[in-house]
Image: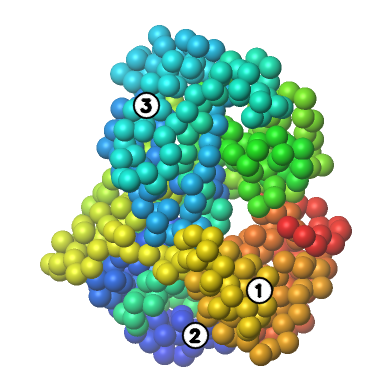
Amino acid sequence: MSSTMPLAGDGVAPAGERAEVTALRAEPSASVVIIGGGINGIATFRDLALQGVPVVLVERNDFVSGASAASSHMIHGGVRYLENGEFRLVQESVTERNALIKIAPHYVKPLRTTVPIFSTFSGILSAPLRFLTHKQGKPTERGALLIKTGLTIYDSFSRDGGSVPRHRFLGANRSRAELPALNPGVKYTATYYDASMHDPERLALDVLHDGLAAGPHARAVNFVEAIGLGAAGVRVRDRETGAEFDLAADVVVNTSGPWTDLTNAELGRPSQFMGGTKGSHIVLDHPELLAATDGREIFFEHEDGRIVLIYPLKGRVMVGTTDLEHDMREPAVCTEAEVDYFFDLVRHVFPDIHVDRSQIVYRFSGVRPLPRHDDTQPGFVSRDYRIEETDVPERPGTKLLSLVGGKWTTFRALAEHLTNDVLGLLGRERVRSTAGLAIGGGAGYPATDDARRVWVVAHRDEIGRERAEVLLKRYGTRAETIIADLEGTDDPVLAHHDGYTRGEIAWLVRHERVVHLLDVVQRRTSLAFTGAVSAPLLAELAEIAGDELGWDAERRAAEVAETARVLSEWHGMRLTEVSVAG
């Protein structure tokens, strides 16, 4: 946060400049520059790095802090896309879902999902019209016959040896036997399996780590924004120091998600590709509602046509989501009207369970990177992706590729597609496939209970059995690096949260490109999501991070104040009491 701002190209590193930025200024060229560090940009970075392509990724905020941080924590095949006729996307999504369960088993696991159904025939007449026109028409909940047909087709896409079980239907009595708190008006339930992604930010960081580990030809920096594109390449600004410099590249890839048009405008290439919609969620500390879900996601289409979910996660219950038009020049915040909507839908499914605002521990909102859709209803806008190519006349031979669309489930396949396009422009061949390639701590992950016990026993001498189990669950086999670093050290638990130790937090700050305190509580850990952040905890974390990053007392106080402000204003958190478990 120095006020020093050297002229571009003067060779003088500003005071306080991070080592990775200094290295980038010293060698400011690559075959490819990627703008945007959400999951699709990070996955493309990894794929290109594995091909040996010199690649630089810049992200204006923290890695995976934008749209990718506001997901519904699902890896899903998109059963509803069948109604839109997007069979290619469903096939790809189901294939990638099944693959991620195998290559990222530490973060992606089968998720039992139950649909409560209130009628037998509802939606049969309107569904063909929606399929043909993609117009909403009069909103109506889907009936049993329509859902049964959709899930039967959905199952047909999952023929890969049984990564997930096929769906099953139950009548009213058996449904209430399994879920006693269900609305008495429920006539059937349909249960099928998609996949849970319980730590999306950590999964993205693993993908990033894989790219960086490919070699020095792959470099990534956060808090560096692209502000122009001309003869010298991509003009970037370090948001921490204000220093500006140019990055020369043969291909520039814009993966800034819902901000794609705004990024292109900054680059001097105005576009109108995007038409994202806002989706909000709330997280509840509600033991009764948690028990009512029976460990499964409740997923259904509400009577207004929106897809909604009630999802047990990390000892909390997440409720979402909305699908509202949004102007990307404005911040995306979960509104009180959306909260009221979420409470209504909980009552719709579990009418005897009371929910109120005192039980909300976290709320968040993001914008889906959907293509411009004009008069098409948000729920029927394609979730597929495409790549737009633009020339850069000021730099002959350089191409700008803009990614339009994309979602968490298909990030690996999307990155493969985008990488192949880049390789074609560079005149290079693919040398390695990412299909079936384990991600981060998923490499060598013990997949069975017996294998996990063996792994834990093998590492218990260093830090104890219980701690080894926690770290394996939290980081997969990358936990071995943390364990080795902590072995033989005095590593007390945090004074204000017993789920993390001081040594673990210090390791995250030291090895995972932490720049601000907010990076720790929102993306390197689950502290914010579970509502576990307190004012004393922030002070404790700032002390640990400050020791690692050289913050003085003024900087530590500023980090605590800014983190508290963001969590309060943007996420509705109350930081008045110490919270320990979570």
Closer mark to the observer between disc 2 and disc 1: 1
**Mark carried by residue 19:** 2
Give the residue type that dot 3 points to.
Answer: Thr
Say whether residue 335 is left or right of residue 453.
right
Give the residue type that dot 1 points to.
Answer: Arg
Tell me whether circle 3 and circle 2 mark residues in contact (CB < 8 Å): no
Q: Identify the residue at horizontal 51%, vertical 31% (top origin).
A: 191
Q: Which residue bears the numbered disc 1?
A: 465
Q: Which residue bears the numbered disc 3?
A: 152
Q: In which quadrant is the C terminus drawn?
A: bottom right
Percent across and percent down for residue 141 are 52, 18
Give the image quarter of residue 104. Answer: bottom left
Local crowd size for mark 3, using a 10 Å CA cut-off: few (<14), some (14–19), many (≥20): few
Local crowd size for mark 1, using a 10 Å CA cut-off: few (<14), some (14–19), many (≥20): some
Q: Which is more toward the observer, 412 or 96? A: 96
Distance, label 1 to label 3, CA atoms, is: 44 Å
